Amino acid sequence: MLGKGKPYKSSGGKMIDSELGDIPEGWGISALCWNSANNKVYCANSNTSTITIIDGVTNSVITTIWLSPNFYPSSLVYNSIDVIIWIQRGMRS
């Protein structure tokens, strides 16, 4: 995995401009969710059917979770009682 605990850009990943600032090429960020208990940011990437987990202190990619093909995450919600991130599936035409 590109990154391996280092910020994506400094580990050689190509960055592109977006409304959120520079993001890795290929990402289509559809939602962000912050877990205040562990300071992790969960990023729904609708273009790649993935969820990326980012360390909120270092802004480093911890890991990327690959979802089922044709599962395009559109929304994320953190449930602090059950400590679960809910993912809403989006639609593609």
Image (cartoon, rainbow, N blue to C red):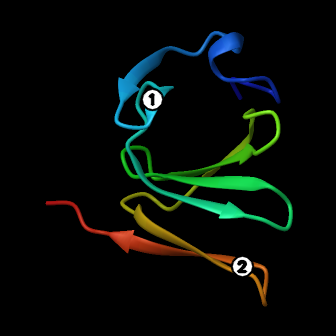
Residue count near mark 1 (Cα–Cα under 10 Å), binned few <14, some 14–19, many ≥20? few
Q: Between label 2 and label 1, give the one nearer the viewer.
A: 1
**Which mark, by number, is residue 91?**
none
Q: Whole-percent x and y of residue 23? A: 48, 29
Residue 61 is left or right of residue 58, and the answer is: left
Mark 2 sits on what residue?
84
Q: From this view, report whether residue 10 is shown above or below residue 93.
A: above
Return the residue nearer the eye: 23 or 52: 23
Q: Whole-percent x and y of residue 84? A: 72, 79
Q: Amino acid at mark 1?
A: Gly
Q: Whole-percent x and y of residue 33? A: 59, 62
Which quadrant of the view contains residue 3? top right
Mark 1 sits on what residue?
21
Considering every residue shown, the one lying at the far left of the view is: 93
Helix, strand, or loop for circle 2?
A: strand
Q: Amino acid at mark 2?
A: Ile
Which quadrant of the view contains residue 39? bottom right
Q: From this view, report whether residue 19 is shown above or below residue 38.
A: above
Q: Residue at x 43, y 37 (%)?
A: 20
Q: Earlier in the sequence, mark 2 or mark 1?
A: 1
Q: Residue at x 43, y 44 (%)?
A: 48
Q: From this view, report whether residue 91 is shown above or below residue 48.
A: below
Considering every residue shown, the one lying at the far right of the view is: 38
